Amino acid sequence: MNYFTGFYPTVRVDGAGDGIVSQAGGAILASMLRGSGLGAGLSEALGPWRKPFARHDPGKILTDLALSLATGGDAVSDVDRLRNQPEVYGLVASDPTISRLVKVLSTVKPAQALAVVNEARAKARAHVWAHAGEDSPLHGVSAENPLTIDIDASLLNSHSEKEDARPTWKKGFGFHPLCSFVDHGIRGTGEPLVTLLRPGNAGSNTAADHIQVVRDSLKQLPEGYRVGRKIMIRTDSAGGTHDFLNWLTARHRNFSYSVGFTITDAVAKMLPLIPKTGWTRAYDSDGFERDGAWVADITGMLDLAAWPKGMRVIVRKEVPHVGAQLRITDIDGHRYTAIATNQKKGQLAVLEVRHRLRARCEDRIRNAKDTGFANLPFKSFAANELWCHVVMLAAEIMAWTQMVAFTGTKARRWEPKKLRARLFEIGGRIVSHARRTTLHLASTAPDVQLLIKGMKRLAALSPP
């Protein structure tokens, strides 16, 4: 006997539904585009690239692409999910129209086009952060509590012959972009600043690329937060190069930094000489002492004359987790890692755990790959650079929405996949009455009240 037939109800299905919106929750992202001024800013910035008598605005086309990625798409054609719901997302261009715009922006002064897009992003970011107040990344920023910019690279595989796709160090084929993100701390997620698209054979520790990413990242910050110890640059060991650290610590810049430091032979020789009293307990990400992990400052044991003045080297040793492979420099059955920083104040354990929290940058890159970054859709390198900016737009409007609409709630830290499943994919019905259009959200959705409260909070965000 087949008992499974009674597990699910049998329903009749037809296609006669009217006024149904399947991505109704995504309306909150459209509200953020309006309130932040990003949509209007892109429209104005890309005006020179708009053809006479064109029906579709270039800025609207880019924001439509960003919305489609934010709500779950990963290709240009996925904008169709918005096209079928004009009551919520307005008039959406056809795929050929979008392709023509991408071609124009990537062939007619492409560097200038990306520059004006970035200017619009920076202006909108400053406006949203100012509105967010205590919930923005700028709240409480000081030399002891700097605004943190994380820099990390990732590999993007290409399955066709795209322009500048090259073999990668992992024996793949594609690209090796270098990205930067602003860390929102434990209360939130983070938001992208720069994506420098590079060929797959680009070096991991190329100082010139790191410098370029920092330069462009600073342009995305509000005035008054573009120089000095209030900004900390955080990278893995790829950023631990002489040229990069010398550039960061130049007198007219004087940034804070925290970078991975390679355990060279000179460092390895000092590890057995560290006295037991030199080790202190390491902290976990919540600020509590962690069993089986210790940190020590070995700056005075090393010859750092060739490095920038004021650099400190902090070593961490820990009991390796099950299955971990020890390196030749590891001794006494412990795994050793090191960081370099010019931060003067703070306990060693605090400085070390602050550096390890850069792992959140890897989460940001993973989320970006879940938002259209995994596969670059165009053959042209310039067009794929534009696509990277669309991905950043999608990630930004989600991060800003979480910062303003969901502050103080569990949704402030949700990743894109959960935001879509719990909020953006809430269904609804469009009803028009007395020349007014109302979107009735599904009352049975578990988080519909959270979404409605967020929409009310966004209503207070007016364009600059």
Image (tube, grey):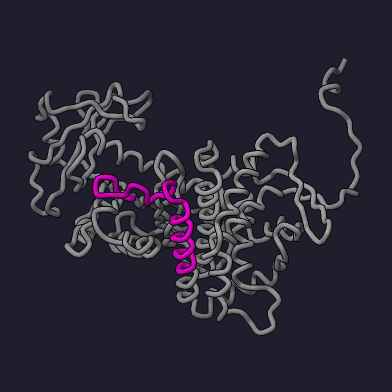
Identify which residue is drawn at 91% across, 49% down: 16
Q: Quadrant of the N terminus?
A: top right
Q: Is residue 438 magenta?
A: no
Residue 130: percent from left, percent from top:
44, 56
Residue 457: percent from left, percent from top:
58, 48
Q: Is residue 453 left or right of residue 229?
A: right
Residue 160: percent from left, percent from top:
56, 60
In depth, the one of 201 and 92 nearer the eye is 92
Q: Is residue 165 left or right of residue 320?
A: right
Identify which residue is drawn at 51% across, 50% down: 399
Instruction: Residue 338: tell me if it is visible.
Output: yes
Identify the main secondary structure in magenta.
helix
Q: Is residue 213 left or right of residue 122?
A: left
Q: Residue furthest bottom?
A: 52
Which image quadrant is residue 397 in? bottom right
Q: Residue furthest top?
A: 1
| Residues rendered magenta in the picture | 118-147
Q: Is residue 129 magenta?
A: yes
In depth, the one of 162 and 355 nearer the eye is 355
Instruction: Residue 387: tell me if it is visible.
Output: no
In depth, the one of 227 and 105 nearer the eye is 227
Q: How many marks?
A: 0
Residue 190: percent from left, percent from top:
45, 48
Identify which residue is drawn at 49% across, 46% down: 366
